[in-house]
Image (cartoon, rainbow, N blue to C red):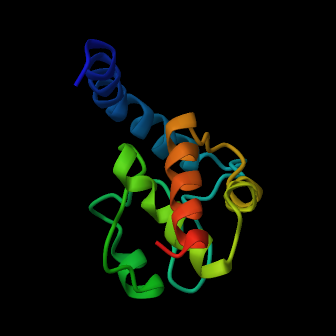
Amino acid sequence: MGVAAALGAGAARLLFYPTLLYTALRAQLPASRRPWFHRIDRAVLLGALPLRGGGALVAEENVRAVLTLNEEYETRFLCCSAQLHRWSPREAIEAIAKIRPHILIRRKQVQVLENFHKDVTAGT
C-alpha cells in the first residue's frame, strides 16, 4: 500500500465517527428529508450503517447482513445490483444517484464497476 493510499484509508477511518454523528443528528431533525436508508430492490437496502438499536431494520426489513461502501472491494454491491437489473455501469450509478443523490461514487469504485461489467458481458 502506498503512502497516499495509507493516508487516505487513515483519513477515512478518522472521519467515520464525526460523519456518523452528523448523519444521526441530521436524521433526527424534524425537517430532515434524508431517510436513514432506501430500498434499491427486494434484496438490497442502501443507506447509513445501522446502529445497535436498529432492531426495526431486522424485524421490519429482514436485514441479515450489512455491507459498507467504505472500502474498494465493497463496490461489488454495485456490481451485483447492476448484473441483477442488467444495468450498464452508468445506469447503475444513475439508479443509485436517483435514490440517494448525496452519495458520491468515487473513480476507483466506477473502475471496479466498469471492469466487472466488461467481464460479465465478455462471459468471463
On-image quarter of the N terminus: top left
Residue 98 location, x and y as percent?
77, 57
Residue 74's spot in the image, x, y percent?
38, 54
User: Residue at the location (61% across, 39% down)?
Assistant: 104
> Image quarter for residue 71?
top left
Instruction: Report whether 47 appears left or right of 2.
Output: right
State whether residue 29 is above or below residue 61.
above
Is residue 119 or residue 45 the one in the foreground?
119
- What's the residue at 38%, 44% (across, down)? 72
Image spot of residue 93 (x, y percent): 68, 54
Residue 39 visible from this viewpoint? no
The part of the image, by quadrant, that contains residue 2 is: top left
- Residue pushed farthest top? 3
Residue 47 visible somewhere in the drawing: yes
Looking at the picture, tell me which residue is in the foreground, 82 or 43.
82
Measuring from the top left, give residue 6's x and y in whole percent. Answer: 25, 21
In the image, 10: left or right of 34?
left
Position of 69 relative to 99 (above/below): above
Specify whether 52 is left or right of 47: left
